[in-house]
Amino acid sequence: MTNEIKITKSKCNQCLQETKHDIQAVHIQKGSEEIDNSHGIVIDWSYTWEILECRGCENVSVKMSHYFSEADGIEVKYYPPTSSKRKPRWIDDLNDEILKNLFNELYIAHGAGAKYLTTTACRTIIDQIMNLKIGNEGGFQQRLKRLVSEGEVSAADSKLIDVALEAGHASAHRGWNPKETIMMDTVIGIVENLAERLFILPELSDNLKKEIPKREK
Ligand SMILES: [Zn+2]
């Protein structure tokens, strides 16, 4: 018996591209059933589970390949699902647990290709950001105006936030979903940018300021 590790090519959620993966373990479940014994007709199926490890970044994922004799081709699924967007590291540094959880679920929905959930999650994230900064009184538009008047965001930023909100409203109420990945990524980009600027960069820049040597008089 040999312990040689096999290699396969697969999309890596960390490297965000197809990379070589070691197949660290394989488990196969299979079965068959005679559905017409007078004609000897048998159907059969199998589920192959592979634990994959990226040879670049060591990210681990599970690949499930489902074969069914009556279906065309093999159905392949990845856990966690393959994603086109990497979760930024700073998400884990958010102090508000609700906001952190919403972002984590956003990347799960996006990775699973759940477009309605992705755009409505972005709207819920904006809602929570508004709650944290200016409270929950008033509708989205009223609170957006207050974000600007209280100096939390610029007028130019509010136009971007408004587009992300409209995408969320359209998904929640009018059954719209983004056709292109770039549209979904744009909405995610707007809420990431907003959260990072309001909750992460102020603290980082304060720390940075303390480190910068004062100018000599
Ligand atoms: Zn990788």
Image (cartoon, helix red, strand yellow):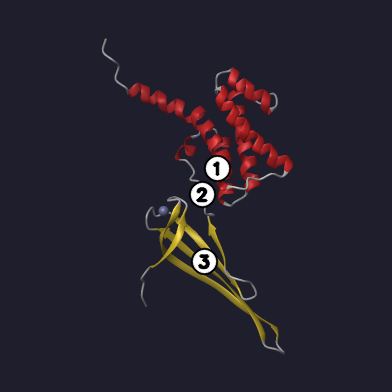
Which residue position holds label 2?
Answer: 84
Between 41 and 32, the one lying in front of the other is: 41
Q: CA distance from mark 2 to mark 1?
A: 9 Å
Q: Where's residue 21, x and y in %?
A: 41, 61
Q: Position of residue 19 (x, y in %)?
A: 41, 58
User: Where 46 falls versus 22 (above or below)?
Assistant: below
Residue 74 in the figure: left or right of residue 93: right
Q: Residue 185: which numbered mark, if any?
A: 1
Q: Residues within 10 Å of mark 2 (few under 14, many from 20)?
A: some
- Label 2: element kind: loop
Asked whether the beta carbons under mark 2 and mark 1 sit within 8 Å of each other, the answer is yes
Tell which circle, 2 or 1, labels the residue nearer the N-terminal end: 2
* Callout 1 secondary element: helix
Whichever of callouts 3 and 1 sits on the residue coming sooner in the sequence is: 3
The residue under the point 70% across, 87% down is 37
Q: Amino acid at mark 1?
A: Asp
Task: From the image, tell me which residue sits under label 3.
Answer: 49
Measured in 3D between alpha carbons, the distance from the residue under mark 3 to the one under mark 2, in whole angstroms, is 23 Å
Quick one: SS at disc 3? strand
Quadrant assignment for the N terminus? bottom left
Viewer-side label of 3, 2: 2
Q: Amino acid at mark 3?
A: Trp
User: Residue 135: in sight, yes or no?
Assistant: no
Disc 1 within 8 angstroms of ligand 1 (CB): no
Whole-percent x, y for residue 172 in the image: 70, 41
Q: CA distance from mark 3 to mark 1?
A: 30 Å
Question: In front: 162, or 147?
Answer: 162
Q: Taking 53 as reference, is 159 above or below it? A: above
Task: Identify which residue is drawn at 37% across, 22% down.
Answer: 209
Q: Is there any visible trace of residue 145 in the rendered image?
A: yes
